[in-house]
Amino acid sequence: MSENRSGAADGPACLQIVPSLETGGAERSTIEIAAALVREGFTALVASAGGRMVAELEEAGGEWIAMPANSRSPATLWTNARRIRDMIRVRNIKLVHARSRAPAWSAFWAARQTKVPFVTTYHGLYTARSPLKRFYNSVMARGDAVIANSEWTARHISSEYGSAPKKLVVIPRGVDLARFDPARIPAERVRQLRADWGATESDIVILLPGRLTRLKGQLVLIAALQKLAGESQRQSVRAVLVGDTQARSAYEQELQRAISAAGLARNVIMAGHVNEMPTAYLAADIVVSASTQAESFGRVTAEASAMERPVIATDHGGARETVLPGVSGFLTPPGDSEALAQALRKMIAAGPAARAAMGAEGRAHIARNFTVERMTADTIALYRELLGETAADGRL
């Protein structure tokens, strides 16, 4: 047994490495797995550049290790690799799990030098237009186990590399049904948030969560809202764009110009980052995920469904698994503002009771297939399988 920085003895440790702990699905999964590792008696280490979610990690019992894991500089990658290698030896690390390409290269080199299992998770889809980019992406398929966060992602991995990695495992992203539970959100909190958004009780609130980037489809939603038939219908709609600018001020200004040009200044609110997303989902009547490029899982559709909200999502990627068309929501072609407008008209016309029924179907679907408990249990089982193989070699 080794000693950590406080002088306490370390138990067997697992190291996850992710570029930052600011916001996003990979970051949320990292913290959830860290909490599960702690419950299972492991030491849970996370190397990253840090961010607002570090406090959550530490509250879950994990330990943050500051590292410029968000850098793509070759010199930094080599420095990080040497540091991870030394950390593996000193901190009794038995497995390394990388969740993004740049830090995966550092983790891969360190894991191979120390002969510990190396795991990767595809949280996104990596396309390559050149042999060099294909090589760069290939580190994500070099794990002793490669986790795909949806069946769609697994098919993409197999297609991209011509054959599946030696151990390709589908472990879908999970939703914390205790956190995303409509029953635990006070009605007054929901009313207050709607009021903050300028929505009356009778208004239809359409929520589009996602960082402010063109790929999330905010412009598609703005164009769809402009197409809604009848000025009276538009007057009753409040669309809320929730998400960080992440220094994309030019795109934020483009959105503001598009809102103004469409005559929607009174209808569309740019709310910025929202910490309490369960309340935000519950404050909406309809949730939209308008991503123009396929998302490997699509956290928004799963979380919104868990909060019993009907979803309109783009018909590609993981949304095809989390949304039941005509049952829990609708799917529309990527970038098709007219199709999105038609789906919004249909959802608005359906009325509160029909929307509530769709929301209930959505939560039931998520509860059956996409819980955080299932994700963490399957991931820990995979870790144990790999560690068992290591034990057989006398290295555990």
Image (cartoon, rainbow, N blue to C red):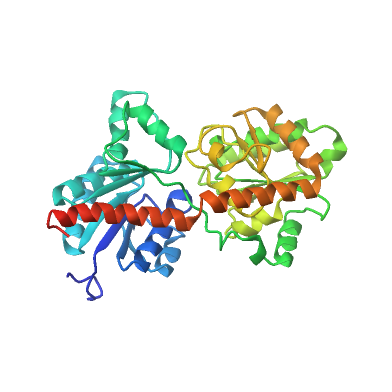
Residue at the farthest left position: 394
Q: Position of residue 18 (x, y in %)?
A: 36, 51
Residue 390 appears in which quarter of the rendering?
bottom left
The number of discs equals: 0
Q: Identify which residue is drawn at 61% across, 28% down.
A: 335
State the residue in front, 142 or 57.
Answer: 142
Q: Is residue 356 left or right of residue 2?
A: right
Does residue 57 appear anywhere in the picture?
A: yes
Q: Is residue 308 left or right of residue 9?
A: right
Q: Identify which residue is drawn at 56% across, 50% down.
A: 366
Q: Is residue 151 left or right of residue 346?
A: left
Residue 2 appears in which quarter of the rendering?
bottom left
Residue at the farthest top position: 130
In this rendering, is residue 283 above or below 218?
A: below
Q: Identify which residue is drawn at 72% across, 34% down.
A: 343
Does residue 243 appear anywhere in the picture?
A: no
Q: Position of residue 233 (x, y in %)?
A: 84, 39
Q: Position of residue 191 (x, y in %)?
A: 75, 61
Q: Identify which residue is drawn at 14% across, 48% down.
A: 113
Q: Position of residue 182 (x, y in %)?
A: 66, 60
In this rendering, is residue 12 above or below 381?
A: below
Q: Quadrant of the C terminus?
A: bottom left
Q: Quadrant of the N terminus?
A: bottom left
State the residue in front, 259 or 314.
Answer: 314
Q: Is residue 366 left or right of residue 74?
A: right
